[in-house]
Amino acid sequence: MDDPARSTAPIDFYFDFSSPYGYFAAEKIDALAARHGRTVLWHPFLLGVTFKVTGLAPLPTIPLKGAYSMHDIERSARYFGLPYHQPSAFPIPTQHAARAFLWLNDRNPAKAREFGLAAYRAFFVDDVNISDPAALLDIAAGLGIDRDELSAVLSGTEIKARLAAEVDLAMSRGVFGSPFVIVDGEAFWGADRLPQVERWLAEGGF
């Protein structure tokens, strides 16, 4: 943990746009990393694919745990000081949002991050169903992204294959939940692990 070559390595941040905990972490991870001289690489992936491997299911569908989780999500939003409104459609498929993010990230990571946060806020604050490509195109256009160009990308096969490869790569790294943060090979699952991530960065491990 004392290797100086590792001390400035980027942090890997994996997230699914249907994950409220992913939203909380997305709002905090860059500032957290910057406090310790780190940057963050954002990686969208699809929880639904990992569920087929882990045998897990969306939180609202799990007996006992589902009811607790819905309460915890709103409590966690208050803890993080973030606006939150339970979406009327939840969970939702997020492949279109993930594909849009990947395409943008290849061209302009800062703009991709701006889009990612806007999409999260649209879903978890304004109750916009971001599984609808038209809604995503509206969000993108509002950020100055060419609507027609992005629409053509989302309807193509190349970006679909790209996302599938990214999801496979994520699972090969042990990613199974959102958010999932990897710091110098050390994995942390959940927004509630952000304080541990911060301490790990501050102390070089524990």
Image (tube, rainbow, N blue to C red):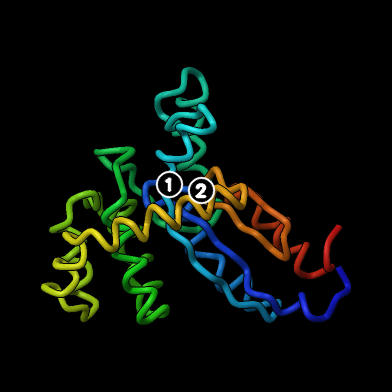
For residue 178, the mark is: 2
* Image quadrant where residue 122 sits: bottom left
Q: Residue at x 20, y 67 (%)?
A: 153
Residue 191 picture location, percent across and down: 58, 51
For residue 111, the mark is: none
Mark 2–mark 1 CB contact (< 8 Å):
yes
Q: Residues within 10 Å of mark 1 (few under 14, many from 20)?
A: many
* Image quadrant where residue 96 sits: bottom left
Q: Amino acid at mark 1?
A: Ser
Q: Is residue 179 above or below residue 63?
A: below
The residue labelled by disc 1 is 19
Give 32 or 49, whichever is nearer the viewer.
49
Give 15 or 87, whichever is nearer the viewer.
15
SS for tag 1? loop
Q: Residue at x 77, y 62 (%)?
A: 199
Q: Amino acid at mark 2?
A: Ser
SS for tag 2? loop
Q: Is residue 93 above or below residue 22?
A: above
Q: Is residue 91 above or below residue 57?
A: below
Residue 197 picture location, percent across and down: 70, 60
Give 75 or 37, whichever is nearer the viewer.
37
Image quadrant occupied by the N terminus: bottom right
Q: Is residue 116 left or right of residue 204?
A: left
Mark 2 vs mark 1, CA separation in Å = 6 Å
Give the residue at the far top of this rendering: 63
Image quadrant occupied by the C terminus: bottom right
Residue 70 picture location, percent across and down: 44, 34
Q: Residue at x 83, y 68 (%)?
A: 204
